Image: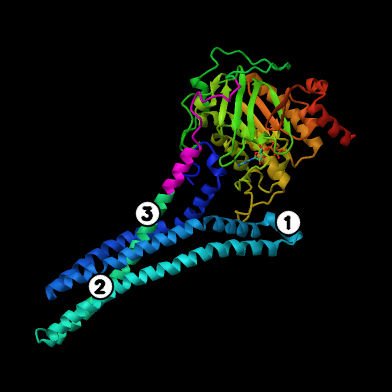
Amino acid sequence: MDVTNGSSGMAHVERPDFADKITVLEQDVQQLRVGLQAVLTGVGLAVAMTLTTVVLAVLHPLLLLLPLAAVPPLLAGRRAERMVNRAREGGAESTRRALGLFRLSTDAAAGKELRIFGLTGEVRRRHRGHWQDATRRLWRAQLVASLVRMTGQLAFTAGYIGAVLVILRDAVAGRRGVGDVILVVTIAAQVNQQVAAAVGVLQDLQRLRSVYRRLDEVHDLVRTADRPAPPGYAAAPGHPASVDHPVSVDLPTPVDEPSPVDHPGSVDAWSVGGDPTSGGDTARDTGGAGLPPARLREGIRLAGVTLRYPGGSQPVVTGIDLHLPAGATVAVVGENGAGKTTVVKLLCGLLAPTSGRILVDGVELGELSVPRWRERIAAGFQDFVRFELPARHTVGVGDLPRRDDDPAVRAALGRAGAEDLIGQLDAGLDTPLGRSHTDGAELSGGQWQKLALGRAFMRDDPLLVVLDEPTAALDAEAEHALFARYRDQAREVAGRTGAVSVFVSHRFSTVQLADVIVVLADGGVAEVGSHADLLAAGGHYAEMFELQARAYR
Ligand SMILES: Nc1ncnc2c1ncn2[C@@H]1O[C@H](COP(=O)(O)OP(=O)(O)OP(=O)(O)O)[C@@H](O)[C@H]1O
């Protein structure tokens, strides 16, 4: 958990090879305990083998070769384990898919569609296919590995027989008594057991080593995949570093303050440190050391921003130039897959641009401390998380240090239009939510969404508010009312911090409330302007607006 969440970006979690490594690791982690036991057993075994060797040497110097016969089985065991390991890595994708289907078929939310569409058999069939693929590889590898181990064991058996023959020959020649023969047979059998145990211990230690090796690989992947482009990384060709998009909108004037950058006092108020009890993100800060401004004066600029997802062949957005003025409410619209969520992730510093720059009041996002920037973001997403916690914390974790601040939680719920929800819960804010609690309250999809929206409104002084379709479960009228209220609040916050509020919505009744509307199409910005400007321009926006308006008439 620490390694996967050990970076502030999330590019690595978008990669399938990362998922494969995590699948193997998830299973391997059980080996840690076995590995520790193996270390202790190994120490005991080494002592026992030394004693046995001494006894053998006393009996006959040639018998000292018997422990040497243990080398082939040990080497064979090592080789066999490597083979099995390779097979497990090769089958990781099939295992991951099979596990995914297993979880799907045991998940309550998926149960509806599986039954209605009669998919249980299909899911089972696919699961079997993936499972068989992974098992077949492993089975084959285990078979060959067993043969390799057997060969090693045969080499030892030859040594064992040789040892007994040496003593037997001496006995026949009258140089030794029956007692010596019995002693050698017994000790050789003991060496055999010790060798078998040593092979097992070695195998466990090898597994322990591969757990650490995989952890290192995952660690490296997290570090390299999430490394933000260095400060001053090149703007896309044809896109100057600073581009102005004059947008004529009537914005609230942010209150003037002496120094817009680096207010230590204000930063303190947001500083949460790494103590998990006081809150705060312990993730490694992959960004720069700069602090975000206490308030925005100019706003956020995207200059020639291009983003290609890890492993993707084509950029999803290309050369985006945008100015999101301080204090503005900005609606981002576009067809499915146009790149709206991608732009949101870029603004939040969850992904670093492949090329181009994102500037916060003229300072590159890559130069800012990412956790510090995040502390100044309030966000709600369509694919929100159902935190199964007491209701107070489900909302309160939106501003971790204030998770127990009931008035703050109630105020956030009020902003989300969800004040009535808590009254419907048996124990109010104390009510545990979700199935992971024995007595947890089960909520509807819309109720969970309202709590997620409340979480998005927990932070009081954000510089960036992003709402990426967090109201998809609400009807158009409810969404419109919520955004109308929200816009007024956004203006009030903008007066304090110059916050830019970005919301993604497919509903034009909501979109038209924004100061600036950004239309994304074909991987770029097709139009930017106010509702009135864009209607007057008669372009893509006007067409989409008219289409939707007609449907509602
Ligand atoms: N992790 C990823 N890896 C590769 N491609 C991705 C990834 N996430 C999104 N994409 C691609 O990026 C494009 C833009 O996706 P994005 O989620 O930004 O669209 P959107 O405009 O928010 O869509 P919607 O309105 O459906 O939510 C899509 O074509 C999608 O296939």
Q: Which mark is residue 191?
A: 2
The answer to whether any part of residue 461 appears in the image is no
Q: Amino acid at mark 3?
A: Arg
The quadrant holding residue 547 is top right
Q: Disc 3 marks which residue?
A: 209
Relative to 207, 456 lies left or right:
right
Q: Position of residue 95 (x, y in %)?
A: 55, 58
Q: CA distance from mark 2 to mark 1?
A: 60 Å
Residue tagged 1: 113
SS label for mark 3: helix
Residue positioned 62% across, 49% down in the render: 432
Q: Secondary structure at mark 2?
A: helix
Farthest residue to the right: give it: 553
| Amino acid at dot 2 | Val
First-in-chain label (3 vs 1): 1
Identify the magenta region: 215-239
